[in-house]
Amino acid sequence: RQGGSDITGIATGFIDLDKQTSGLVRYFKMKVVKLIVLALTKLLDNGELRTRFGASGKERCEREFGIAKINQAHKDLYIHC
C-alpha cells in the first residue's frame, strides 16, 4: 500500500509491551491486537469508511461534549448539591 502505515510494527509493539502475562492472558491480548490491526487496516484501505467514521465521531463529540451539554451538566450538579 503506497503511503501506508506500519500496522505490523504497531501490533508487534503492543505484543512486546507485556512479556510477563500468563499464556491464556497473552493469547487473548494477541487476539485483541489482531482485531485492532484488522480494523486499522480496513480504515487505511477505505477512504469512504474513514470519512464516515470521522463525521460520526465529530457529531457524537459535539452532541455529547458540546458547550450546551457541559453547561447543563454543571447546572445540574450545583442544583443537586
Image (cartoon, rainbow, N blue to C red):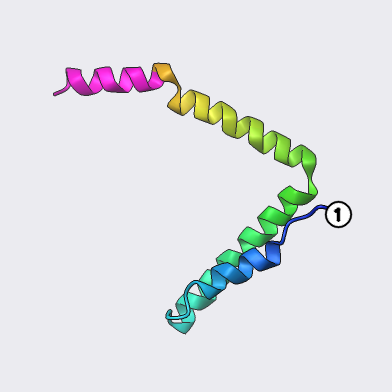
Label 1 neighbour load within 10 Å: few <14, some 14-19, many 20+: few
The residue lying toward the viewer, choosing from 62 and 10, is: 10
- Residue appearing at x 57%, y 26% in the figure: 59
As drawn, the residue found furthest toward the front would be: 3
The x and y percentages for residue 47 are 78, 41
Main secondary structure found in the magenta portion: helix
The x and y percentages for residue 69 are 39, 20
Q: Which residue is mark 1?
A: 2
Q: Is residue 7 above or below residue 42?
A: below
- Residue appearing at x 19%, y 20% in the figure: 78
Span colored in magenta:
69-81
The x and y percentages for residue 15 are 55, 72
Q: Is residue 67 above or below residue 25?
A: above
Looking at the image, can residue 53 be seen? yes
Q: Is residue 58 above or below residue 42?
A: above
Residue type at numbered disc 1? Gln
Q: Is residue 28 above or below residue 6?
A: below
Looking at the image, can residue 34 be seen? no
